[in-house]
Amino acid sequence: MKTKILLKEADMPTHWYNVMADMPNPPTPPLDPNGNPVGPEALAAIFPEELIKQEMSTERWIKIPEEIRDVLRLWRPSPLYRAHRLEQALNTPAKIYYKNEAVSPAGSHKPNTAVAQAYYNKQAGIKRLTTETGAGQWGSSLALAGQMFGLEVEVYMVKISYEQKPYRRSMMHTWGASVYPSPSTRTNAGRQILEQHPDSEGSLGIAISEAVELAASRDDTNYALGSVLNHVLLHQTVIGEEAKKQMEMAGDYPDMIFAPCGGGSNFGGIAFPFFADKAAGREVQLVAVEPTSCPSLTKGLYAYDFGDAIGLTPLLKMYTLGHNFVPPGIHAGGLRYHGDSALVSQLHYEGLVDALAVPQLETFEAGVLFARTEAIIPAPEATHAIAAVIREAKRCAESGEPKTLLFNLSGHGHFDMSSYDRFFAGELRDYDYPEEAIKASLADLPQVKFPQN
Ligand SMILES: *Cc1c(COP(=O)(O)O)cnc(C)c1O
C-alpha cells in the first residue's frame, strides 16, 4: 500500500489555473466607495502591473515564469499522502488523502504566492514590500521570498500573534525582514486604533490598513497580500494541479475536498483545479472549513465590504462579518479574517462551494489525533480541515460508504507548540458565536449603490 505519492521536478506545473475562466457568472468587480468599478490605475499605487493584470484576467491558463519555478523547485512538487494510520484509527471505510504543503521552507502553502509576488515586484523596479501577518506564516513566507529576489520586507504582525509566536519573528529576522506588532504607532491607521482601543490585540484587518497606508505613501514601496485577492488564489493553484496528477497516479478521485479557509487562498489553491472538472459536469464536493468564532462563509453577509479595518482598500463583494469585526483570539491566527476571497464567496453564494465551521477544541483534538497517527504536527489552521475530514470519515464509518476524501495540510505547527501546550493544560476553550459583535459590525457595512448589492 502506497503512503507517499510523489511527482518528479519535471512534473511541476508550468501554468497557473484561473478559475475565472470556468465560473458560471462573471466575477464581481471591486468597487470604490461611490460604487464605481475600480480600474487598474487605482491599484497601481500598491501593486505591480503584472499582478493587476492577473487580478482581472479571465484567461484559463497563465504561464509561470521560469525564475519563479526555479525558486518553487526548492520544495515543490509537494508530496501527496494516503493517511492509512488515521483511517485505521477512525476505523473508517473512507480513503483519506492529504497534500502536504508543510514541506515549504516557511512551513506552509504561503510561499507559493510570496515567491511570485516578490518576483513581479522586483521586475517592476520596486525596492521594498510591506505586508501584514497573522500567525506569522505569511510574514515569514514573504521574508523568504523577498530574500530570494533582493527586496526589503517590512511586516506588521497582529499583536496577539507577535506575543504568542516569538519564533516566527525570529524566522522573519533570519530572512532579513523587519517586524512590528500591529496596531503600531508607525502609521495613522495604527495610531487611530490605539486611541480608541489602547489594549487592542490587533487583527488582520488592522494590520492590512497599516501596511497599505505605508505602501501607498511611497513610490519605491508596494504592498503584498497573503490571501483573498484573485492573483493570490491563482498562484496557489499549483497545489491542486499537482494533487490532481497525484490522485490519478493513486488511481483515485476525491468525492470531497477540504481545506481550512481564512482568506481562501489555500482552499482555492487545492479546490479550483478540481472545480474545472466540476464545471465540466464531474461530481466533486469542495468544502471550505472555518472557525465557529470567525464564521464568515457560514454566518456572514454576502455584500460589498472593505478588505481592511479602516477602509483603505477597494470594496470587495464577499461573505463578511463586517470590516470592524475583531474575532476572538483563537490560536488559528491565520483564520482570523473578517471576510473571504471574492471568488470563493461567489462560488459559495452560487452553491458550488460548501462551507463548514468547527469549534477550537475539536480542531486541537483533531490535530493531536493526526500527530499521533500520521506523525506530522499540523498548524492550528490546518487542524480545521482535519477536524472536518474526521467528522466525514466517522459518518462513512456509520454508513459504510467508502468515500474518497482529500484535504490540504496547509502547514505544520512547529511554531505553534505553545498553543498545543495550552490545549494539553486545559487552558483553551471554545468561543460562543460572537453574535452581538458581528451584528454591530455588520451595521457599519459601507452603503454602496451597485446593482448586485
Ligand atoms: C494562512 C494560513 C491559512 C489560511 O489562509 P488562507 O488564505 O485561507 O489560505 C491556513 N493554514 C495555514 C497553515 C496558514 O498559514
Image: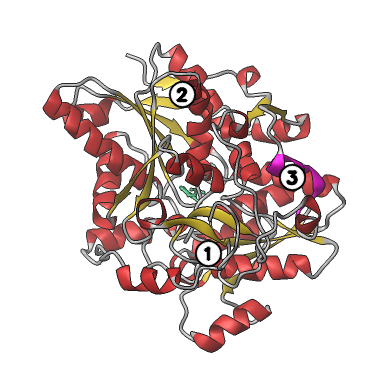
Residue 55 is covered by the magenta coloring: yes
The dot on residue 51 is 3
Rendered view: 85 above or below 389? above
x, y percent for residue 357: 31, 50
Q: Main secondary structure of the magenta part?
A: helix
Foreground residue among 366 and 422? 366
x, y percent for residue 215: 75, 65
Give the CA separation, mark 2 to mark 3. Answer: 27 Å
Mark 2, secondary structure of its residue: helix
Q: Residue at 73%, 50% (x, y): give it.
A: 147
Give the CA separation, mark 1 to mark 3. Answer: 22 Å
**Chain-order first, disc 2 or disc 3:** 3
Residue 305 is covered by the magenta coloring: no
Which quadrant would residue 89 be assigned to in this image? top left
Would residue 108 be visible to someone looking at this image?
Answer: no
x, y percent for residue 275: 49, 28
Instruction: Report which residue position mark 1 lands on.
Output: 204
Mark 1, secondary structure of its residue: helix
**Chain-order first, disc 1 or disc 3:** 3
| Contact, mark 1 vs mark 2 (Cβ under 8 Å) | no
